[in-house]
Image (spheres, rainbow, N blue to C red):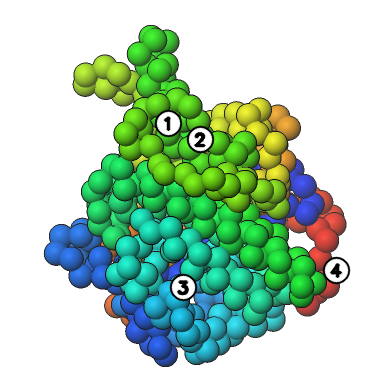
Amino acid sequence: MTDLLTNPPRFAADFTWGVATSAFQIEGAASADGKGPSIWDTFCRQSGAITDDSNGDIACDHYHRFEEDVDLIAAMGLRAYRFSMAWSRVQPSGSGPWNEAGFDFYARLLDALAARGIEAHLTLYHWDLPQGLQDQGGWLERTTACHFADYAAEVTRRFGHRLASIATHNEPWCSANLGYGNAQFAPGVADAGAAIQVSHHLLLSHGLAMTAMRAVCKQLGCSPKLGIVLNQWCADPATDSAADIALAALEYARSVEWFMDPLFKGHYPALALQAHGEHAPQVADGDFAIICQPLDFLGVNYYFRAWCSAAIPPLPPPALLGRTAMGWEIYPQGLTELLLKLHQQYALPPVYITENGMASADLLRHGAIDDVERIEFVASHLAALKAAIDGGVNVAGYFLWSLLDNFEWNSGYAKRFGIVHVDYASQRRTPKASARWYRDFVAQQRAATNGEDNHENDENH
Ligand code: IFM
């Protein structure tokens, strides 16, 4: 086992340690207090869409239990929480009237976090588009980007002064490719060309929202950090054959550079554009100027690498450390590799690892879950993260995915990512061994840095 606890690497005193969740995966209360339906509410009703035929109607019932959940975060000594807002809870149709009861819920959540000294890191869009906008074409329509900017501005107006950061999107690669490319996610479209056009509209919506939020912040004098969260991986060729190297370069261009180049360089990567051929997106004059604007932070979600073998059947990765319950290769060095490469390619703002974690079987035995695999996973990824920091990458924080077991999209409730176990029948929460490990690790970091962590009123937390 990585000796992170006996010989922990030292992260900066002001490094942010947190946990992450998203609205649809935990909130439940699918139609409570005026909430409108989202594309995931609709998608879950399609036969065969979700492995266990479940839905987000109740999920972790966080809508009614958020105080208890915020207590769990506080009990781990964490001072940062990343969560998302359900757009259709605060604007039921995605355009038109706001829903005050929906905003009230997030105001109460922010109160609960503030009372425990926990910073709030909000994501505006974690895949749950209001169904009303989907009925008008969803992300295939350019106007959806304008509605998103209106929503971003309104949220900033109401909560900007209470938020540490606001991310526009979570993992737009997934929204585009899994939602529109292969129908694995809502809205369930399988059309390669649509996926690429959607990715452009998502990027455009990010840029429009950034402009709108900056204007509101200026007007109100508030300063949440504004950015975006991307899921990324390094792409490793299986051999040094020209075919494997070309495959890896194309994979990296189509996934990582497809989003990073427009955001940081103001164009799409030539290699991927060429590969998309007739499916290349329609880009209006001025779009890149909207998309490519300064970010206060970049969120990186890292789970696995892309292993690129052109052989048939493909060569498996050598020296496999293991696979998670999702079937994803466990490859911590990939985090170092990815971050160093990004650092070399782009003028990065401070980076936050906004998600990292694993799904495992996590059986409850005699009231306890001894998830040693997850501890090893997190420990080895933190060591890999420290290696990237030592290599010069400016990483400001780490958010473990996830606080709670939750609705894992098309896998339903079968895959458990939480460091807190949820018994869905009783809604009982049971911290796993990994929750205690993370608590102790973060406490050690604080002790090692003599409490010089920019929090002045330690005794109040
Ligand atoms: O659960 C998801 C999350 O919503 C987005 N990033 C990946 C996680 C694990 O699949």
Amino acid at circle 1: Leu
Amino acid at circle 2: Tyr
- Residue visible at 68% across and 40% down in the picture: 348
Mark 4 or mark 2, which is nearer the start of the sequence? Answer: 2
Question: Looking at the image, can residue 376 be seen?
Answer: no
Mark 1 or mark 4, which is nearer the start of the sequence? Answer: 1
Spatial separation of the CA atoms under disc 3 and disc 2: 29 Å
Q: Dot 4 corresponds to which residue?
A: 456
Q: Dot 2 corresponds to which residue?
A: 268
Mark 1 or mark 2, which is nearer the start of the sequence? Answer: 2
Spatial separation of the CA atoms under disc 3 and disc 4: 35 Å
Q: Which mark is residue 87?
A: 3
Q: Is residue 27 left or right of residue 409?
A: right
> Does the CB distance between marks 3 and 2 fall below 8 Å?
no
Q: Could you say which is closer to the camera, residue 14 or residue 341?
A: 341
- Disc tally is 4
> Does the CB distance between marks 2 and 4 fall below 8 Å?
no
Q: Quadrant of residue 254?
A: top left
- Residue visible at 48% across and 27% down in the picture: 270
> Does the CB distance between marks 2 and 1 fall below 8 Å?
yes
> Disc 3 on helix, strand or loop?
helix
Q: Is residue 188 left or right of residue 376?
A: left
| Residue 76, percent from left and from top | 61, 66
- Residue visible at 76% across and 75% down in the picture: 220
Mark 2 or mark 3, which is nearer the start of the sequence? Answer: 3
Mark 4 or mark 3, which is nearer the start of the sequence? Answer: 3
Q: Could you say which is closer to the camera, residue 422 or residue 184?
A: 184
Spatial separation of the CA atoms under disc 3 and disc 1: 32 Å
Mark 1 or mark 3, which is nearer the start of the sequence? Answer: 3
Q: Which mark is residue 273?
A: 1
Of tags 4 and 1, which is closer to the observer? Answer: 1
